[in-house]
Image (cartoon, grey):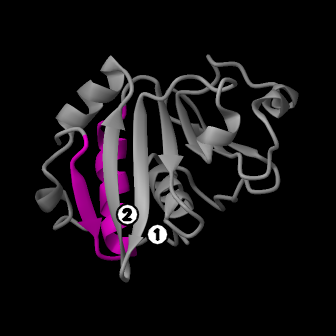
Amino acid sequence: MKPGHSIHLADEAATIALADALARQLPARAVVWLHGDLGAGKSTLARAMLRALGVQGSIRSPTYTLVERYPIADGDALHLDLYRIGDAGELEFLGLDADDGRLWLVEWPERGAGGLPPADLHVRLEVAGSGRTISFEAGTETGRDWLEKLEEPERLLTQVPDSQGIC
């Protein structure tokens, strides 16, 4: 997939298919910053990706806890929602280390700027009618390699997996 390429996600099933494709090509370690307004689909994409990585049971929103940790193959996934923090200094109280976890999924990363590991991949989501528009930007070589390995959007969105109770 070309960096900056935007695709339309018609519905939740398309979001799940995209998350599955991202999970299949997950690098050894990755930091993903999820950008978008309230209701843009950041949490839905994060939950779908965690589910695709084998997380069983409830996938809780980190809205109030700020961070939820889930075991995945070869490490942990950290899902952060920074909407409620006032500044990046508050991240210190979470006791996170940049080397923690195999995968970081960070919602509202701009609120933690300067206190987060750099993004390998920036994912921007916007509401577009009844669906979503999503675009990607690599922040590192790892992110560029990850994007190159993704299938073409039109192909992956025709391979919609069964919904597994993501929402």
Residue highlighted by disc 2: 16
| Residue type (three-letter) at the residue carrying disc 2 | Ile
Query: Percent position (x, y) of residue 162?
Result: 34, 71
Q: Is residue 140 above or below residue 56?
A: above
**Which residue does the image show at 82% across and 55% down from the upper left?**
64
Span shown in magenta = 4-26
Q: Nearer the viewer, mark 1 or mark 2?
A: 2
Secondary structure found at label 1: loop
Whether residue 72 is visible, yes or no, is yes
Query: Percent position (x, y) of residue 158?
Result: 16, 67
| Disc 1 residue crowd, few under 14, some 14–19, many 20+, Cα 10 Å | few
Residue highlighted by disc 1: 164
Q: Quadrant of residue 105?
A: top right
Secondary structure found at label 2: helix
Q: Are marks 1 and 2 in contact (CB under 8 Å)?
A: yes
Q: Which mark is residue 156?
A: none
Of 99 and 1, nearer the camera is 1
Instruction: Give the Cα distance between marks 1 and 2.
Output: 9 Å
In the picture, measured across the screen, residue 6 lies left or right of residue 165, that is left
The residue most toward the bottom is 130
Compare marks 1 and 2 and give the one earlier in the sequence: 2
Query: Percent position (x, y) of residue 29?
Result: 46, 24
**Which residue does the image show at 28% across and 31% down from the upper left?**
146
In the picture, measured across the screen, residue 132 lies left or right of residue 100, that is left
